[in-house]
Image: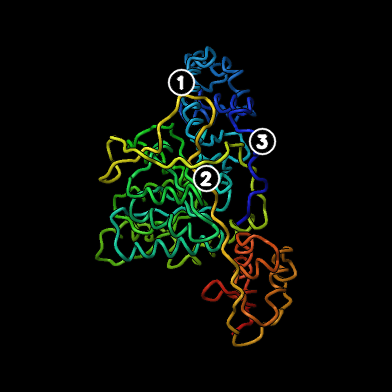
Amino acid sequence: MTDSAAAPPQAATWADDDAFVAECLACLRLRLQPGIGPRTVRRIFDRYDSAVAALADARSFGPQGLCPDDAAAALARGLTSRAAETELAAAAAKGLTPLPYFHPAYPARLRELPDPPAMLYVVGDVTLLSGPCVAMVGARQCSRYGFGAAFDIAAGLAGAGVTVVSGLAYGIDRQAHLGGLAGPGRSVAILGTGLDLVYPDANLDVWRELAAGGAVVSEFAPGTPPRAANFPVRNRIIAGMSLGVMVVEAAERSGSLITARLALEQGREVFALPGPVNLPTFAGCHALLSQGARLVQTADDIVSALARELAPFVGAPRPAPPARAPRRVTPPVAASQAAPPDRPGRPVRAGRPAKVAKPAAPLLAAAQPKRAANTSSPEPSAAASSRPSAAAQALAPLEAAALAALADGHKRHIDALAAELAVAAKDLSSTLVLLEIKGLVRKWPGMYYSGEAQG
């Protein structure tokens, strides 16, 4: 719903920032240390202001009851230092952006988890991770009904400025990403592999679109193959980054239900699409609905349910992303022989690590350009009237400006209105959603808006 508050620094790459590299290495050393898992890392990070500060005090971890004494002693001796340096060098060679736990661009919602990742790797727009996100998950082998619904609901969410998060699996996940990329909210994929692998290979085209116009994220090191155990781990991030989880189509025993359960444990909303009762791939959705999940038919159902959670994002700047290398595309070129737990097909390796310590070839292209404004507008059936009310008197500045622009008796396309108000379409989209929720504007087909008094 908001654009980045600041562009990534261009003068230097992250590998030239010694303090940033030291923080990344400290996070990796903790993650790689045997005897220390994500929950222990969270306990440690709760006591310190940075991973570097935590490691400097590693010998006290045992007496503080933070981790076993032998793990603390190993950390103090630096036994995982070489492995951490090797992993970070591989990420640099691939042009991946590391995002350590204490960096301001690290998603704040992930810090709420009992087992947050110590560090993430990102390709694409890092700022999307901290914006308003809704997860969409579902069956790989889905029905035509679920296939179409996933795209339509995702496109509706993205049109409202909400980022669609999914797992880049086949079927529902694929449609969720494509629908999300169709709107200003865009889409983020969370992988169960290293970022230099595209899995399943049938989604290589979607991976490229996400790298160019959204984001691809993983906590796994470059080169990590698609092991079956990785995907439940991945699912906690999908749920954790999101304000809610939408299950589009899922059988009774499904990985999508694991994501829904994680969302409930994390205090997130769970939504489900009802389907034909004779399709077993909707049995999981019906079970969720019987347990209290919110029934969803359109994206508006989700936006309305999350109105309170979405409100803080309107006009709020996102944290600046960490520095990254100048962008140059290195398309995926070779296939991996890793075992495929997700579905038949092989992952595609996005280049091979070079033996260099500096970023050399980032994987992503420039972000999607904004759509051209559409100034043609059909005449409404009646003139809009301005209705002073308690809601109207408490409007934010952009809400008031948008409402005033819509009080002239004409339907206005969102792009034309954004150009007139000199704001980003993403900001305006979320503002219009809130005005619609307040009953002050009406949304028409084709992304046209008018005052609510329009007939």
Q: Pointer 1 and pointer 2: residues touching (CB < 8 Å)?
A: no
Please report the residue visible at 56 percent of the width from the left and 59 percent of the height from the top. 161
Percent x, y of residue 123: 50, 42
Residue 331, above or below 355 = below
Which residue type carries mark 1?
Ala
**Residue 111 percent coordinates (x, y):** 56, 39
Label 1's element?
Answer: helix
Q: Which of marks 3 and 2 is nearer the N terminus?
A: 3
Q: Is residue 396 visible?
A: yes
Give the residue at mark 3: 11
Asked whether, in this view, residue 388 is left or right of residue 455, the answer is right
**Which residue is under mark 1?**
83
Nearer to us: label 3 or label 1: 3
Q: What amino acid is at disc 3?
A: Ala
Q: Quadrant of the N terminus?
A: bottom right
Disc 2 designates what residue? 124
Give residue 312's quadrant in the image. bottom right
Between 347 and 454, the one lying in front of the other is 347
- Give the left or right position of residue 264, taking residue 447 as reference: left
Categorize mark 1 by other alpha carbons within 10 Å: few (<14), some (14-19), many (20+).
Answer: some
How far apart are the alpha carbons under marks 3 and 1? 29 Å
Helix, strand or loop status at disc 2:
strand
Q: What's the residue type where badge 2 is placed? A: Gly
Q: Residue at x 48, y 57 (%)?
A: 181
Secondary structure category for the residue under label 3: loop
The first of marks 3 and 1 along the sequence is 3
